[in-house]
Image (cartoon, rainbow, N blue to C red):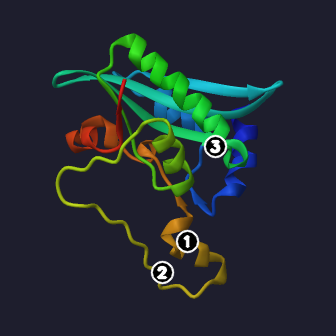
Amino acid sequence: QFDALWQSAQRDYPVISRRDRRFLQWRFFSRPGVAYTVLAATRGDQLSGYLVLRLAERGHGLRAYLVDWLVKDKSTQVLALLTREAIGRARDAGAVFVSVRTGTPLFEKVFRGLGFAYWRLGPPEYFGVRLDAPDPALQDAGQVANWYFTMGDGDAEMGFEGLDQIGRAHV
């Protein structure tokens, strides 16, 4: 089901890293010493989307991170459903807040609608792309707005404490 979701959803985003079953197994389930929870949304017998949640003790309590997600047809309804479930689980576990990062304006709107607020401490962060190749097939990659990325595309939730202040919602 995760491979079928990946095959369908990858067409929605011009620049996205692989998120098939094999990648998810490697990135989230084979990682020693770190536990992730994958929430899945289905429509009938088809996977409509998933969200990866991580709970971690840091500083003054349990913190929750929405590490990664992928939804079919850019469905804001499916992402909202998964996010509400993740917030509920974080609350039930005793998390003091939930943190999320997104570079996708459509998804930012979903998170804001669910009570997440932009919160930044420190200098702003910027992301840029420069292409030197004239290949027309690469032109979409030259536009940052075409890039899809989450915390799951790196190890941000593992050690950068500044992320605890960005995009958080109290639970």
Q: Where does label 3 land, which residue?
A: 76
- Give the residue type at disc 3: Thr
* Contact, mark 3 vs mark 1 (Cβ under 8 Å): no
| Residue 64 screen position, x and y as percent | 36, 27
Judged from the image, the secondary structure of the residue bearing numbered disc 3 is helix
Q: Which mark is residue 160?
A: none
Q: Where does label 1 land, which residue?
A: 141
* Contact, mark 2 vs mark 1 (Cβ under 8 Å): yes
Q: CA distance from mark 2 to mark 1?
A: 8 Å
Q: Is residue 139 visible in the rendered structure shown here?
A: yes
Q: CA distance from mark 3 to mark 1?
A: 24 Å
The C terminus lies in which quarter of the figure?
top left
- Give the residue type at disc 2: Leu
Instruction: Indicate the quadrant where residue 140 lies.
Output: bottom right
Q: Residues within 10 Å of mark 1 (few under 14, many from 20)?
A: some
* Residue at figure coordinates x 76%, y 39% from the top left: 4
Q: Where does label 2 land, which residue?
A: 131
Nearest to N terminus: mark 2 or mark 3: 3
The N terminus lies in which quarter of the figure?
top right
Name the one closer to the observer, 82 or 10: 82
Q: Nearer the viewer, mark 3 or mark 1?
A: 3
